[in-house]
Amino acid sequence: MSSSDLTQKNIEELERQCAYLQEQLDQVKVEQANYLQNVSHQLVAPLNAIKWHIENLTEGRLSVERAKKVLRSIYSQSTIAVHLAKNFALMSNLEEDHALTALKEPLQPVSLCRLAINLADDFQPLGWEKNIEIGVKKQDFEAAPEVLVMKPLISQVLSNIIENAVKYSHPESSIQISGHYDPASDMVLVNVGNRGIPLPANTPDVFARGFRSNDAKNKYPAGTGFGLYIAKRIVDIHEGSISAQTTEHGTVVFTVALSVRGLQGKARLRDG
Ligand SMILES: Nc1ncnc2c1ncn2[C@@H]1O[C@H](COP(=O)(O)OP(=O)(O)OP(=O)(O)O)[C@@H](O)[C@H]1O
Ligand SMILES: [Mg+2]
């Protein structure tokens, strides 16, 4: 084979690779546009609901009971809007850079029990709309040591799991959050259990970027399928684990395990 043949072959190969990369880039652009559209569409819904509720309140002809209900709905819708906006910010961050330092959050000791109680309070008004009670079982959980984590990120992990539990639960059911310390691994485990739509046959799929089961799409057509992907990425960054399973009684349980001291010395600590 002459050297000009070789050069021609190299050029063809480079052209093929270039076309392939261009195709991938186009696909990413389409995905990004779809994601943006989906997020903004989802953000508009709670904001419109809030606007409508406020209009209702300012007309002033509501009974005290009704006004309380409307205020509770405003609270739930704001919880959703804040939750979505935080996921959106995290998603841009995670897509930009995979490194721990890129997330720029310092580590701080966090009581996962307290965090769970606060999040349960935050999501409870949303649950009430479907008569769903969110309970935190403090036994064992309260005694667990604090974990050294990036608090806003771990808060978003639990909030993505709890939001799913509320969204995908049967009405009139309950969500149970529990936790305990495992001395063998020096980890604190948090479980969120709910009863509702089933997990997909291949359970790990739920953590894949953009995955949504047909049951989920039927129940809630809007959704990005990024909530658990974000959760897993954050947990991975913390060198912890996240998993899902269905118990023999049909309860779907998500478990997050975080190391008490695992990240010590690997990232900046919060001052003070
Ligand atoms: N508690 C649950 N019970 C059953 N299936 C679940 C539960 N939580 C998540 N899933 C499944 O995992 C999929 C991925 O969840 P994820 O939170 O990533 O996306 P989503 O909830 O569909 O969309 P988004 O979070 O953007 O609103 C869901 O679509 C659903 O199929
Ligand atoms: Mg979700």
Image (spheres, rainbow, N blue to C red):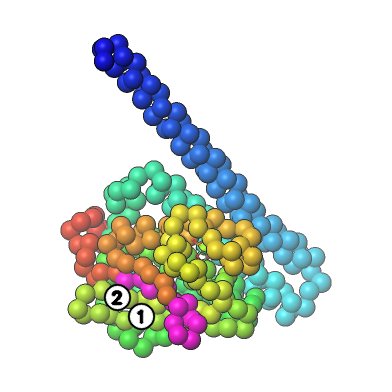
Range of residues picked out in magenta: 246-257
Q: Position of residue 226 (x, y in %)?
A: 48, 56
When the figure is inspected, residue 66 is found, relative to residue 85, above or below; the finding is: below
Observer-nearest residue: 214 or 163? 214
**Amino acid type of disc 2?**
Val
Tell me, yes or no, whether the highlighted magenta stretch contains residue 251: yes
**Residue for badge 2:** 188
**Residue for badge 1:** 179
When the figure is inspected, residue 53 is found, relative to residue 27, above or below; the finding is: below
Secondary structure at badge 1 equals strand
Task: Report the residue at 65% width, 75% height from top.
Answer: 129
Task: Report the residue at 30% width, 11% height from top.
Answer: 4
Instruction: Kindly tell me whether residue 86 is visible in this rendering.
Output: no
Q: Residue furthest bottom?
A: 139
Report which quarter residue 157 is drawn in.
Answer: bottom left
Asked whether, in this view, residue 253 is left or right of residue 99, the answer is right
